Image (cartoon, rainbow, N blue to C red):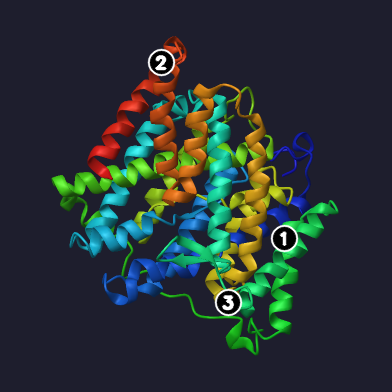
Amino acid sequence: MKKFFQFEELGTNVRTEFVAGLTTFLAMAYILFVNPSTLAADGATGMDAGAVFTATALAAAIGSLIMGLVAKYPVALAPGMGLNAFFAYTVVLGWGIPWETALAGVLASGLIFIVLTLSGIREMIINAIPASLKMAVGAGIGLFIAFIGFQNANIIVNDDATLVSLGDLSAPNTLLAIFGIIVTVILLTRGVKGGVFYGMIITAIAGMIFGLIDPPKGLGDIVGPVPSLAPTFGQAFAHFGDIFTLQMLVVVLTFLFVDFFDTAGTLVAVASKAGLMKDNKLPRAGKALFADSAATVVGATLGTSTTTSYVESTTGVSAGGRSGFTSVVTAGFFLLALVFSPLLGMVTSAVTAPALIIVGVLMCTALKEIEWDQFEIAVPAFLTIVSMPLAYSIATGIAIGFVFYPITMVVKGKAKEVNAIMWGLFVVFILYFIFLQ
């Protein structure tokens, strides 16, 4: 196993990888409850929440396992936030498309992804992105997930006058999250390896001590039955023939577009943080992209929206994860979650929020790699970074930055430095804003 995952070459070991895999799982565990709630929408979509819970856990486990064994990256996968809301509230409830047909649309996007991956087109596109823009994507994702962390902790809340503002810092769960941030900062400042993970553990224990998190009281709070997959399993294939309409074409293209660039941004960010980038390229990128594509197909078959690479994987990287074994461990915990789901109630947003915020800090170290002294680079980089949290979308941030890159380069007289792929993306993103936004 050590040889297969190249532990010595990567400077890691089984214990470190295990802690990293568990850390990633804890940072992602919320999706086990948020995804069923979103896709079922309190019964409005017609989807069975129990079946979606099981589909979510299995899709995450299988996807992470493929990533760990095939691509050997410390990147875990699960149904993505954002696309699940698009699935439920736009496609099903807004446009009146049956959830079964929407699942078929997810399946179609996954199959198209596999074709693009096997042809090498996806890898070629990602490797053609300039280094500064890749760093901008990583930093932007850092700000984005930090923003999510602040929201989850209710440190930042909605404000009708100013869009966002400071929340009630005296609220018990907000205080718990602030405590978690302080503890994690202290651990990392002291150089404690796995500080992000230990910070979450200490925060959860503090939550139980002060009555904010319910500790397990008996076997019923530890082990629960696994909900049946029957209501959703295979529905995507059964309704595949319903996707050949203009409206479903827009749906499939949206799934395809958002997942394509969210995945690209996530892989670049995690690989950069783990020190796995070589000559500004992702090694084994084709295998990583195939794992992501295959996970979407698996997830759609089981009964969930697009399964994709998770930026929360950076929490595991921060805990020392460097090999695919991190993802294998995460996969194992998702499988365990099927049986021990009641225990996940202890991993509240107040526990995971500090990890997301601190990881945001760590990811913003990529800012120093951007050529800020070159205005033609600084503008698209800045717009990429700031648009992600403000638009609440990784894909939108990438799109805005990549539209401005050719413009500033041409004006600067550097048109020859803009490769054909970046020009192609320029056109694609312009069409995206015109027709799909």
Q: Secondary structure at mark 2?
A: helix
Q: Amino acid at mark 3?
A: Gly
Where is the C terminus found, in terms of image quarters?
top left
Mark 3 / mark 1, whichever is N-terminal: 1
Q: Secondary structure at mark 1?
A: helix
Q: Position of residue 366 (x, y in %)?
A: 64, 36
Q: Amino acid at mark 1?
A: Phe
Return the residue found at the far bottom: 217
CA–CA distance in space, label 2 to label 3:
53 Å
Q: Secondary structure at mark 3?
A: helix
Residue closer to the observer: 373 or 35: 373
Mark 2 / mark 3, whichever is N-terminal: 3
Q: Position of residue 329 (x, y in %)?
A: 64, 55
Where is the N terminus found, in terms of image quarters?
top right
CA–CA distance in space, label 3 to label 1:
17 Å
Q: Position of residue 380 (x, y in %)?
A: 47, 30
Residue at left 51%, top 25%? 127
Query: Decide: marks 3, 1 in contact (CB < 8 A)?
Result: no
User: Which numbered circle lies on residue 345?
Assistant: 3
Residue 326 appears in the picture as rendered: no
Residue at left 75%, top 60%? 184
Residue at left 48%, top 70%? 33
- Residue 404 lies, with reference to residue 88, above or below; the image says above
Give the total of numbered labels: 3
CA–CA distance in space, label 1 to label 2:
46 Å
Query: Decide: marks 1, 2 in contact (CB < 8 A)?
Result: no
The residue labelled by disc 1 is: 197
User: Which numbered circle lies on residue 410?
Assistant: 2
Q: Residues within 10 Å of mark 1 (few under 14, many from 20)?
A: many
Q: Residues within 10 Å of mark 2 (few under 14, many from 20)?
A: some
Q: Amino acid at mark 2?
A: Val
Residue 179 appears in the picture as rendered: yes
